[in-house]
Amino acid sequence: MCKFLQEEESLASTFNTSGLKTKKETVNLALEEFIQKRKRKETMELFGKTDFNKDWSPKKAWGKIDTTIWSKA
């Protein structure tokens, strides 16, 4: 089978599955999902490669957090 026909069949299948109105929307959605999947994969690859400091505290790092801005109503 011709490579072009395989790509058209894949696009048609994706278009029908997505329920979107246009092929352009379908391609854009597929690209967004691909990018999200790749970013998740890259993030997962970082696990175990960074040091964890159990004594780290954001209050120590940035000083005491001013919570009075949330108590004003």
Image (cartoon, grey):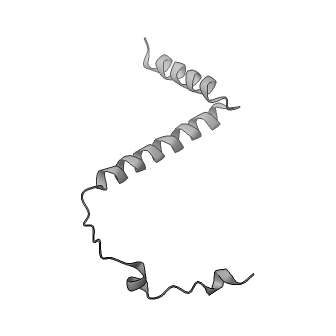
Is 51 rendered above or below residue 19? below
Task: Give the residue at the far top of this rendering.
Answer: 1
Q: Residue furthest right?
A: 73
Instruction: Please name whichever residue, 35 or 70, is drawn nearer the observer in this view of the structure.
Output: 70
Name the spot of residue 5 as percent of width and height, x first: 50, 17
> Residue at image x 71%, y 31%?
21
Residue at image position (56%, 87%) is: 66
In front here: 6 or 55?
Answer: 55
* Image position, residue 8 (x, y; %): 54, 21
Based on the displayed image, in which of its 4 quarters is residue 55 positioned? Answer: bottom left
Tell how many labels: 0
The reply, left or right, for residue 18 in relation to residue 43 is right
Q: Residue at x 43, y 11 (%)?
A: 1
How far across and down, in percent of the image, does residue 53 sit? 27, 71
The residue depicted at 67 percent of the width and 32 percent of the height is 20
Q: Above or below — where is 20 with respect to 46?
A: above
Q: Is residue 63 above or below residue 17?
A: below
